[in-house]
Image: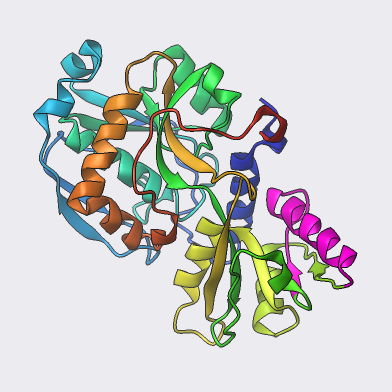
């Protein structure tokens, strides 16, 4: 796997940079790779726990659904545990996955969803934190049942893994709170704007393509680069740039952290990380032919039906990345773009 060429790697780079902007001292302490057992599979799951203000904590009652539990592979059902892989080492990437204020518990929207799915399936969630590379080693070796860690579905990955989609893979424009501009999906709306973007990222590739199109039409968008995302946000609050363009979760996190301050920002619109032709999707990832993707997808769909999926995303300010249905092995990024 060429990490630089994957959307997930580019996203984590953007999220890692955003982490430097608003320090979560406890949240960014590296967590060891030991498994974290989250208590018995049961009907109460705390979402947004120990988030240091990044989420609105909520207690959700999630009874097991026996019809879905019965569809699990026998070995997983008999074991009574769902081993959830999260690739958040060494530093974490809020709001998706990072170490909470107790300096040991993995919090974030990704492990929270894994715990909710485990509850629906009547299993005890056991969260294993690792590096991105070791996450896939864990899946391949059978030490991890399913990963909830911002994995983008690609056709290349389908050769080894099966997927249950649960969130859109989106980029976002971030604007000052007092700026009414919104991105309506048409690159022409960027004409005359100055936009910050990180070098070597998927969002840069998309923005530069839009710039080429505008220039061909006799217009332009000014692209600005900064040494780190903190510098870009300072330029945004100081009105030296109009917009910042980056991963939607990072933008959502920054919006939450700046709310009510003089530097408050807002999301000014999103765009698929896969480009115009395909909506990129983030999915739970299991070993191919493991038999886990389908019951996991049905568990996510159950949570969508009860409204608890929406509650989870709202708690982490990620409602704009919601899917209406979890799909098994949906269309992924083509090999030429993955």
- Which quadrant would residue 236 be assigned to in this image? bottom right
Whether residue 206 is in magenta: the answer is yes
Q: Is residue 146 above or below residue 193?
A: above
Q: Residue drawn 17% across and 53% down? A: 60
Quarter of the N terminus within the rendering: top right
Residue 279 lies, in percent from the top left, at: 54, 46
Look at the magenta stretch and give its main secondary structure: helix
- Which quadrant would residue 22 be assigned to in this image? bottom right
Horizontally, residue 298 falls left or right of residue 190, namely left
Residue 68 lies, in percent from the top left, at: 17, 28
Residue 210 visible in the displayed image: yes
Whether residue 290 is in magenta: the answer is no
Residue 216 lies, in percent from the top left, at: 89, 63
Report the front residue among 286 and 191.
Answer: 191
Q: Residue drawn 60% across and 35% down? A: 333
- Which quadrant would residue 227 be assigned to in this image? bottom right
Residue 115 lies, in percent from the top left, at: 27, 40
Range shown magenta: 194-218
Quarter of the C terminus within the rendering: top right
Report the front residue among 14 and 51.
Answer: 14
Q: Residue drawn 77% across and 60% down? A: 210
């Amino acid at each position: 796997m060429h990490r630089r060429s994957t959307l997930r790697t580019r996203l984590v780079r953007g999220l890692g940079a955003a982490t430097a902007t608003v320090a979560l001292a406890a949240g960014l302490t590296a967590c060891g790779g030991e498994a974290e057992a989250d208590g018995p599979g049961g009907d109460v799951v705390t979402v947004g726990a120990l988030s240091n203000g990044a989420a609105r904590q909520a207690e959700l009652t999630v009874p097991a659904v026996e019809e879905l539990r019965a569809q699990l592979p026998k070995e997983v059902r008999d074991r009574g545990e769902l081993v959830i892989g999260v690739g958040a080492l060494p530093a974490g990437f809020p709001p998706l996955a990072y170490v909470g204020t107790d300096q040991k518990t993995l919090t974030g929207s990704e492990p929270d969803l894994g715990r909710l799915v485990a509850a629906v399936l009547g299993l005890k969630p056991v969260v294993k934190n690792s590096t991105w590379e070791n996450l896939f080693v864990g899946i391949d070796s059978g030490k991890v049942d399913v990963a909830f860690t911002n994995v983008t579905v690609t056709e290349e990955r389908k050769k080894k893994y099966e997927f249950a989609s649960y969130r859109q893979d989106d980029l976002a424009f971030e604007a000052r709170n007092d700026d009414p501009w919104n991105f309506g999906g048409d690159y022409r709306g960027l004409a005359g704007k100055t936009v910050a973007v990180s070098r070597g990222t998927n969002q840069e590739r998309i923005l530069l393509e839009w710039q080429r199109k505008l220039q061909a039409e006799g217009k332009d968008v000014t692209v600005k680069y900064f040494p780190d995302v903190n510098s870009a946000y300072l330029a945004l609050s100081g009105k030296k740039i109009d917009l910042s363009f980056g991963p939607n979760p990072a933008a959502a996190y920054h919006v939450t952290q700046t709310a009510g301050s003089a530097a408050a920002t807002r999301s000014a619109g999103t765009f698929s990380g896969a480009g115009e032709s395909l909506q990129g999707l983030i999915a739970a990832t299991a070993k191919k032919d493991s038999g886990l993707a389908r019951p996991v997808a049905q568990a996510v769909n159950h949570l969508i039906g009860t409204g608890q999926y929406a509650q989870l995303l709202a708690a982490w300010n990620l409602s704009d990345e919601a899917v209406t249905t979890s799909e098994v092995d949906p269309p992924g990024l083509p090999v030429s773009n993955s």
